[in-house]
Every structure is written in C-alpha cells, then in structure tokens.
Image (cartoon, coloured by chain):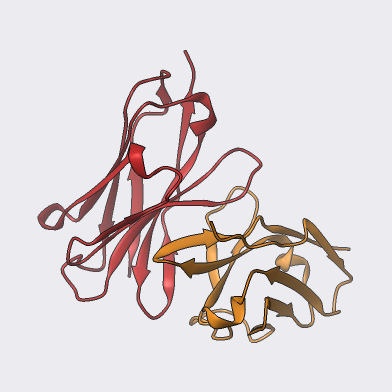
Amino acid sequence: QITLKESGPTLVKPTQTLRLTCTFSGFSLSTSGVGVGWIRQPPGKALEWLALIYWDDDKRSSPSLKSRLTITKDTSKNQVVLTMTNIDPVDTATYFCAHFNPLYGMDVWGQGTTVTVSS
Amino acid sequence: SYDLTQPPSVSVSPGQTASITCSGHNLGDKYVCWYQQRPGQSPVLVIYQDNKRPSGIPERFSGSNSGNTATLTISGTQAMDEADYYCQAWDSNTAVFGGGTKLTVL
C-alpha cells in the first residue's frame, strides 16, 4: 500500500524560505519510471502543479515558479523535499505530494499540509 | 503556457448523467487524467489515460478525449459523487490542471 505524508512549518514569514518534506512508503524512488510530485491548492482555489522528481533524479517544475523551487530526493530515507524561496502571502495554500506512476499519473496523494504565509 | 478550461459548476439530479468538460488546444493529442476532490479531502484519481479507471473506481465513471475537449461522464450520479473535479494533462513535461468544476447533485 502506497502512502505519502507531507510535513513542514504551518506558518512562514514573507521573504523566508519554505521547506516541505514528503515521507512515503510502499514504493521505492529507485524504481524505473516512478516519481514524486508536489501540488498546492490555495484556500478555495484550484490545484496548481509545482514540481516532480523522477527515479533517475530528472526534475521538472512549473515554469512560473521554476526560479523559486528546488526539489530533491533521499532514496534511502524515502523522502522528497521541496524548497520554495522568497515566500509571499499568495503562497498560502495546502501543499500535497503525490506518487507518480508513468502509466497512471499522480495516482496516490498525501493528506496535504497547510502553510500560511503571514508576518 | 498551456491552459485547460472547465466550467465552474455543473448540476445533476440523482440517478442522471453528469458530463464535465475540459478544453485545451489539441487536447486530444494528450492523455488526460481526472481527479475527484471531496470537501476537506485530498484529490483521488478517477480516470487516467483519457478513459481508464483505476482499481476501486466505480464503473459509472468514464472518460473520453477528442479534438480540443475531454469529458468526464458520471452515469447514474449518486449523492456521494458531489465534489470538485479537476482535469489534468501534460504539456512540455509539465503538468497542467484545469480550474476545477463543482458538481452539485440535487
């Protein structure tokens, strides 16, 4: 059974750097084709894809946020970390991580973690 | 950037068929996924590769994709199907979500 859980600060001040961790089980990020992605959802708004890291360390990120995002993996710890710099109140959202399967897409999601950006 | 457009809301009576559209330039050339998100919950994949259902998703959920429009169809809609639905596709190795459609069953 695949599970993912997001963790990180619930409150961040503007201009700071946000670091979120996705800890997963039930699969290995060294398996060919597999990836872990990050998606966010501002309160009452739509889903927004942020980034994806693949088993071979290939990385993709949203063009609009590319300069602010870094995604890394620690295969031995079964973790993926998303870093977002220069945080702004518009970054207030629930952040989800999801398992990526080349056949199914983002097929299993974590419960999400809520981040509020405020001074 | 690539955009996917969904109607903000769709209403359906219980037992009837609900159709939710997702429009994008030459969307038929891409694979589309659909996600269901109930209030306060995480999204759940209900359709992948345009028309395939993951294990555990009821047969009443189906999908199609042609031209510039993908459609999620829910046959025999039940009260439990009331949720937000998002389409998603890949363009230039980046994922794009539609703006979401709130399905109301009344």
Query: In the shown orientation, is residue B25 left or right of residue A78?
Result: right
Image point 39% across, 81% down: which residue?
A: A103
Image point 37% across, 26% down: which residue?
A: A86
Q: Percent position (x, y) of residue B98? A: 62, 60
Query: In the shown orientation, is residue B66 left or right of residue A100?
Result: right
Q: Percent position (x, y) of residue A69? A: 33, 41
Image colour assigned to chain A: red
Image colour assigned to chain B: orange
User: Which quadrant of the structure image shows residue B80?
Assistant: bottom right
Query: In the shown orientation, is residue A15 left or right of residue A40?
Result: left
Q: Nearer the viewer, residue A13 or A4?
A: A13
Image point 36% across, 67% down: which residue?
A: A100
> Total label count?
0
Q: Percent position (x, y) of residue B58? A: 62, 82
Q: Nearer the viewer, residue B102 or A88?
A: A88
Q: In the rendered image of this protein, does residue B70 appear above or below residue B44?
A: below
Q: In the rendered image of this protein, does residue A56 appear above or below residue B16?
A: above
Image point 47% across, 25% down: which residue?
A: A88
The C terminus of chain B lies in quadrant: bottom right
Farthest residue to the top: give it. Answer: A119
Q: Percent position (x, y) of residue B70? A: 67, 77
User: Which quadrant of the structure image shows residue B6?
Assistant: bottom right
User: Which quadrant of the structure image shows residue A113?
Assistant: top left
Q: In the rendered image of this protein, does residue B81 appear above or below residue A69?
A: below
